Amino acid sequence: MQELINRLARAIVSDDATKADRITTHILARVKYPSEPYQIAFQLKSALKIVRRKPHHKIDHDTMWFLKTEEEKLVQCLQSGK
């Protein structure tokens, strides 16, 4: 799971919304519903879906901040064992 999170962080930073979306799908498949990690991953997936509808799939500054914040929350939840 940690490797998936690391790959997600790299995809977000490299502005690759398509890859980040695919990785988030894998994370959703591995966490239990309706746990907190699932909710966070679902929010990430929703935000990435909006980004993918934009021309050139570019992640704007506000969305980038949101994605990074949610990714950090996901890491904290998984490390704390929630």
Image (cartoon, rainbow, N blue to C red):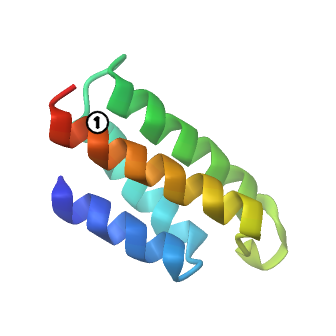
The one of 38 and 78 positioned closer to us in this rendering:
78
Q: Residue at point 32% right, 21% down?
A: 35
Q: Residue at point 39% right, 65% down?
A: 8
Q: Residue at point 46% right, 36% down?
A: 40
Which quarter of the rendering shows the C terminus? top left
Q: Position of residue 73 (x, y in %)?
A: 40, 43
Give the residue furthest to the top.
34
Q: Position of residue 29 (x, y in %)?
A: 29, 39
The one of 82 and 3 positioned closer to us in this rendering:
82
Give the residue furthest to the right.
55
Q: Is residue 35 above or below residue 76?
A: above
Which image quarter: residue 74? top left
Q: Secondary structure at mark 1?
A: helix
Is 18 placed left or right of 55 in the picture? Answer: left
Q: Is residue 78 above or below residue 4?
A: above
User: Is disc 1 surrounded by few (<14), some (14 to 19) or many (20+) residues within 10 Å?
Assistant: some
Q: Residue at point 38% right, 30% down?
A: 38
The one of 22 and 51 positioned closer to us in this rendering:
51
Q: Which residue is mark 1?
A: 77
